[in-house]
Image: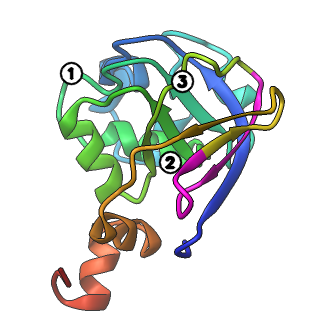
């Protein structure tokens, strides 16, 4: 990821309070550690056909409190392994938000009510905006602190720490 990172993809819209068990059902979480296998079940309790609709780089778009529930890191990892480029939501459960950044999955806080399922979106992390190309609308995003952008650029916290040996604040 670069400083002016721009992501493009299609919106897959969900509602409020999408918990980690909706992201990856508990019936799968403890059967395997293979994230590619788990990714096949991403969001299936809400939309059984979800992974068949997703193209690499697409976005999950949700309302408030996305990622509530357990603190397990499988939820953002499964989303990332399913090919999702970022999650946009009005708000995130704090532990999910931090886990997402730590695992290299952009978590973008912004107003999402104007976004429709299937809309083509562009997220410009550097400029701090989301453009709904389909509707011709634009929305500001809550900017991430520089250290979080650096973690995303490196692909997650582990890769960041391997490269830098610690935090550069």
Image height of 17 relative to 151, above or below: above
**Badge 1 element:** loop
**Image mark for residue 69:** 1
State the residue position of label 2: 80
Residue 156: within the magenta? no
- Nearer to us in this view, 48 or 1: 1
Sequence-wise, the earlier of marks 1 and 3 is: 1
Q: Mark 3 vs mark 2: give the one in front.
A: 3
Which residues are the magenta region?
118-129
Res. 168 visible in picture: yes
- Nearer to us in this view, 10 or 147: 147
Picture colour scheme: rainbow
Image height of 55 relative to 151, above or below: above
Quarter that holds the N terminus:
bottom right
Sequence-wise, the earlier of marks 2 and 1 is: 1
Quarter that holds the C terminus:
bottom left
**Badge 2 element:** helix
Per the model, the C-alpha gap separating discs 2 and 1 is 18 Å
User: Does the residue at mark 3 contact the one at mark 2 (Cβ under 8 Å)?
Assistant: no
Left or right of 92 on screen, residue 126: right
Res. 37 visible in picture: no
Q: Give the quarter of the image for residue 7.
A: bottom right
The residue at 34%/48% (across/down) is: 100
């Amino acid at each position: 990821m670069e400083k002016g990172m721009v992501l493009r993809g299609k919106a897959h819209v969900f509602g409020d309070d999408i918990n980690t068990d909706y992201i990856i059902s508990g019936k799968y979480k403890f059967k395997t550690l293979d994230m590619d296998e788990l990714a096949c079940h991403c969001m299936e309790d809400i939309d059984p056909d979800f992974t068949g609709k997703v193209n690499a780089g697409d976005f999950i778009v949700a309302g408030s409190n996305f990622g509530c529930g357990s603190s397990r890191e499988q939820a953002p990892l499964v989303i990332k392994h399913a090919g999702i480029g970022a999650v946009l939501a009005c708000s995130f459960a704090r532990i999910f938000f931090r886990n997402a950044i730590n695992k290299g999955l952009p978590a973008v806080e912004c107003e999402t009510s104007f976004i429709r399922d299937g809309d083509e979106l562009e997220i410009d992390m550097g400029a701090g905006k989301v453009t709904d190309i389909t509707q011709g609308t634009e929305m500001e995003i809550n900017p991430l602190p520089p250290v979080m952008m650096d973690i995303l650029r490196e692909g997650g916290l582990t890769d960041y720490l391997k490269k830098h040996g610690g935090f550069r604040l």
